[in-house]
Amino acid sequence: MDVGLMQMQRRLAEYTSALFKEGILDSQYVQLQELQDESNPDFVVEVVSLFFTDSEKLLNDLSRDLAQQNVDFRRVDAHVHQLKGSSSSIGAERVKNACIVFRNFCQEKNIPGCQRCLQQIKQEFLLVKSKLETLFKLEQQVVAAGGSIPTSGSLPTMQQPIL
């Protein structure tokens, strides 16, 4: 195997491992990868891209809803619930966890708490989006160099060196 390709695969494995260790992704992402196969090689990228688009709309809706004179907390909670579900389905663990806290503030009708949570979710969303975009670029580089992409479940951990 080409030394350059081996280095790219090592970099990809280390980067992916870090996403799990930092709590950015959870095991749901691995399950999402397991649904991808030769008949639909872009499945994960497509699902995650839909998550990005839908989440940006929900975040804009939440910003607008919380800026209203009379906040409709049922509507805010419904948006947060939807965001929690979609982030959970792709394994965006930190976004999902921030949504759980946000929903608690919605139930308390705590506007300042909701606004703080919205800012936290926006930060976590931008982080996961940036990290996944980088991950997809690394995967594209490996494939372009003739390599294959292992699923996260078969990626080496820091204790398992790549041979």
Image: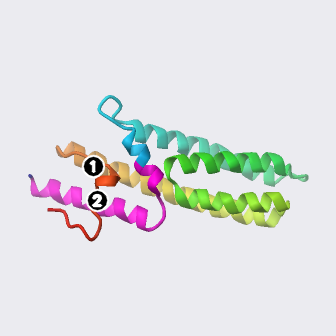
Magenta region: which residues? 2-30
Q: CA distance from mark 1 to mark 2?
A: 9 Å
Q: How many marks?
A: 2
Q: Nearer the viewer, residue 36 or 126?
A: 36
Q: Where is 121 relative to 143, above or below? A: below
Q: Is residue 125 left or right of residue 70?
A: left
Q: Looking at the picture, does residue 95 appear above or below residue 54?
A: below
Coordinates of residue 122 in the picture (x, y in percent) = 62, 58
Residue 123: quarter of image: bottom right
> Which residue is found at the position 37% from the left and 53% from the top?
135
| Quarter of the image that includes the C terminus | bottom left
Would you say the magenta stretch is mainly helix, strand or loop?
A: helix
Residue type indicated by callout 1: Pro
41, above or below 160, in the image = above
Kindly identify the residue that appears in the image at 48 percent across and 65 percent down.
23
Please tell me which residue is depicted at 91% across the width and 52% down the height of the picture.
70
Where residue 104 sits in the image (x, y, percent)? 76, 61
Q: What secondary structure is marked by label 2?
A: helix
What residue is shown with label 1?
150
Q: Are marks 1 and 2 in contact (CB under 8 Å)?
A: yes
Residue sitting farthest toward the bottom: 159
| Left or right of 58, for residue 30 | left
Mark 1 residue crowding within 10 angstroms, few (<14) / some (14–19) / many (20+) = some
Q: Residue 7 location in percent, x, y?
A: 18, 60
Q: Is tag 1's residue or tag 2's residue first in the polypeptide sequence?
A: 2
Amino acid on which the number 2 mark rests in the picture: Ala
